[in-house]
Amino acid sequence: MTQTKIQRHLQERSAVLDQEKTIRHDHAFKTNMSATAQTAAKIVARIRQRESEIFWTTPEGSHSEAKHPVVFPGMSFAISRDRMQKTSLWRIVSAMPKGCLLHAHMEAMIDIDWMLDQALQIPGFWVSSPASLMLGASTNPPAFEFHYRPNRPVAEATASIWEADYPPNELIPIAEVARTHPSGVLGFKSWAISQMTITEDEALYHHHRGIVDIWKKFASCFRGIAGLFYSEPIFRRCVPRLLQQLHSDGIKYVELRLVPRPFHRTGSDTPELDTHYFLECFSQELQRYCSSADGSGFWGARLIWTAIRSLPDDLLRASMQDCLSSKAAYPAVIAGFDFVGQEDLGRPLVELLPLCDWFQQECTQRNLQIPFFFHAGECLGDGDATDANLVDAILLKSRRIGHAFSLYKHPMLIEMVKGQKILIEMCPISHEVLRLTANILTHPMPALQARGVAVSLNNDDPAILGHGGNGLSYDFYQVLLAFENTGLGGLAKMAEDSVRWAAFEDEDETAWLEGIEGRLDSNIFTIAMDRYLIRMSFLLHQHLFDAFDRLPRDFVAPSLYLLDHFSVLSTMEEFRVMATANRAGGHAAILRAHAEPLLYDEIFWIWRKPHSPPIPLLLRTILRRPQLAAHIKSFHLDMTAFHEYHPDVGRYIIHDHPSVDELDEHIAFIRRTGVPHRRSWIRKLRQGTTDAFLALLLAQLSSLRSLHISGVVTRHSNLVGLTLVSAICESGRYQLPNFQHLREVNSHFMPRSNRRKAGREPRKSLPWHATNILPFFYLPDLECLSVSLGSPIMWLSPHLPASSKLRSLDLGHVHEADLGEILSVTPNLETLHWYWYYPTDVVDGVQTSTLDRGQLVAALLQVRNTLRELTIEAVALLPGARQFPRSLLFKDTLQKLVHFDKLVALECPLVLLVGLEFDDVQRFREPVPRNIEILRLADDVWCPDDGIPTQGLLREPSDILRTLCAWLQASDWRTQTPHLRRIELWQSRSSPAYREDLGQQLTYLGARVGVQIEYRRNS
Ligand SMILES: [Zn+2]
């Protein structure tokens, strides 16, 4: 081709592509976005591209699953779910306003785990089954049910539902069923959860078995759920909890599909005769939630009545009758009608035409508005009866269509859907788990969008399908990552359409169609979306300026630096226009009132620059407008810049000095506090140390909920510590905030995520003195604490702290002898991460070369009744030193860990758990707790084979694989650890690789006995 020919081709090419995009449903929205929103979308596209390449791509040349799990953008949800949460894109998506949730089945939205807990707490719940549930012998899936019978007397001796002689259908109290499960209450719960949800294995590995197979399991889940969900005591608790979960994910309104079933009033053994009281409970709880503080800003919820499509005419007619009378009694609650259940096996809409016709006539006669919102085309067929449900749904004037998975095969129906303004409720993750598509990449959704069809995103049955949460973030994320053409603008359009197509109130056909166009004009949703984009573009600007190229996975926030440093007036002006476009007489003050709490609520600085972070700038802003400080809920400073250390002062020096006037005001503030260390504070402030400025900033932040300080700044921050001591331990004595709102504190030299990467803390890394950390234990509402402490432990006030709300504790630099002292004040601890580091060349008096495991377990016994997750990290090898420090001594054993019944996840270095005889199966299994689910074994304390034969040391790392094989082959391992489902083997960078054949052997064996084996390497 000649140059001109190529140029002509390229011109035509882009003209064609541009022309084609104009057909897209989101085209007008995207082109009309403000310049700021378009910039935000562009940056999101870059982040998406970057994360696809770095985070979602297996490195070149690695064929070993053991070293690098195979990943790709758009891979199966079940295996990418936890991974996606580590990305910037996730943060962007989860912060996004999502409009309305239009397709979700309420019974399938309540976490089974939580519901079982309610049934075990509330008196009156029973279990029955047509046959014994004897594990391994029952029908698959077993047909057990729950019953609420609060007045039924409990017989003294009952049969066991787990034994062969259980009399069929006999009701057994749930507590008894749980207690007699071969693995106790926890065993019962995890068994019941696996029966009432689609497990990861079922979601992922059995696609070849097809849709009918997975629907068998899916439908059976509802049978178990019904006996719990349709009882007043549990149902009333479900409603506010569910609404709060949706609300906190940015959802403003929800339409819940629901099959009404026999409902038991509190204290009643017999069900209600109709659905009215059930609807009464729903509307009471809804109103209560909406008028609560949590519910402020939530628009509401309505129900779509659903009947099971496989039922015979008489039962369907009865359900429809009930729907009509319920609508008359609760017109605000019921928004519409639908049929549910597997379409392929149920009755097609064409067969239900007479019933639909009768129902519509009844509605007209009784003057009720109950429009159809049909499921249709949730199938793979082409031209079969299920596929044809689509045409019936359209002709029956369904206002939206659920799924419409097969619509893309029907060009004419697509035109009808567009012409009749029907929205398609897409449920991408549901389609994946229920085997309509192998992953999001083969989903037909983009085909519909490209042809101009309106689509919204929905989660369908999140509690059963394994979403792991109740919002829409997962579905939004999948779509954003998978399809280049969607982008932030495409998601925003889908969110907007969910508002346009929501049935907020009863409307006739004309009002409904007009409403789709006009609904947003007076709606605050536009403002919410604009606010989000304002915030996003601020955050993203910062992201782009500061860290984009160097730190693609870190998300760097505000904004304040920009506000003060760059001219943002023009942008602010644009925001004003955006935020007030729909309101006549809007004023910049309105925008300020809306935008400021959002802009200031999180200060997130990951500082890698050669100069100091803009603390003086923020102080200056607060000095001018002190009310801004109250907006700051979260302060995160991770500062890694070694250039600024001034040996004379022994401090990191602030770059941007305040003016004389500002400095005077700061000094006056410090004097007013009256703290005993004010003189040194003022002196250091004059010298310009980061420590003094940071202490001054923290002293302004009275609303702080989360505090994170890491990096060099922790090393010389004595003033920060002293100020916190004065503020917390002598609360009220000085003019300082008391930090009572703090829920989360994190302070390490090296942030946790990097520690895993680097494998160890740098030498001499002890940050703050223990006295600077201990005040945090006196905060009554603190939930999560992660600090390096140092020893010894001396409590600061005559009374001991009681950190009764502390659930999670991450401790570095605490000797095992001092650990008990700490754990004695944390009675409800659930997660503990204890970090032991022996720097072979530094003597700091805290860690010695001896680790007394007996002492360690004795300390842990303080939290034995609550501890669920335990991580012991131990590192004793310095870079370059290939030799195992022979002087290390591990006294006693961890054997008593076996008594920790609540412990479900344990991470521990191999040598601490089993000593150096990795091939001794008996030693290996002795300390493993009975209810353990996940076992992570690390080799951080490791002896590499350097060719020197060393007595008693392991020289063949693969021995551990042989030991694990022997353990999993032993006949009694399942009885000893019935819930074990995953073993992770972590290796540090320098460790020799495991033998591949042994690795494979263990993986196969694991798969056979139901234990997932994973090989991980610290990168
Ligand atoms: Zn559905």
Image (cartoon, helix red, strand yellow):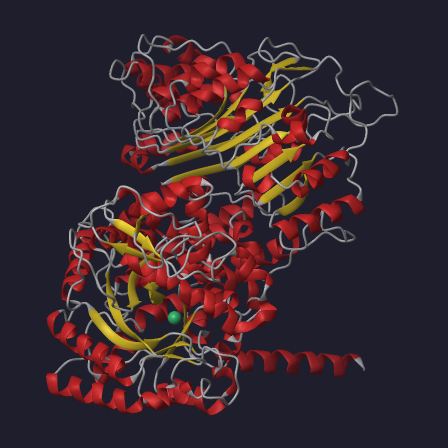
Q: Quadrant of the C terminus?
A: top right
- Which residue occupies the extreme right position in the image? 947
Check the image and report above or below for 903 versus 379.
above
Quarter residue 52 falls in? bottom right
Which residue is more in the foreground, 427 or 141? Answer: 141
- Report the side of 403 relative to 330 (left or right): right
- Report the side of 713 relative to 881 (left or right): left
Check the image and report above or below for 815 versus 747.
above
Q: Please state the horizontal and vertical placement of residue 984, each as a whole percent of the image.
A: 63, 41
Q: Please state the horizontal and vertical placement of residue 373, each as a whole percent of the image.
A: 31, 78
Q: Please state the horizontal and vertical placement of residue 562, each as a whole percent of the image.
A: 45, 43
- Report the side of 1018 relative to 2 (left or right): left
Camera sees residue 551: yes
Q: Quadrant of the N terminus?
A: bottom right
Which residue is more in the foreground, 886 or 577? Answer: 886
Which residue is more in the foreground, 970 or 357? Answer: 970
- Report the side of 903 relative to 307 (left or right): right
Q: Please state the horizontal and vertical placement of residue 168, each as a whole percent of the image.
A: 36, 59
Q: Quadrant of ligand 1?
A: bottom left
Identify the residue at image location x=57%, y=42%. Answer: 974
Check the image and report above or below for 292 versus 611.
below
Check the image and report above or below for 353 versus 442.
below
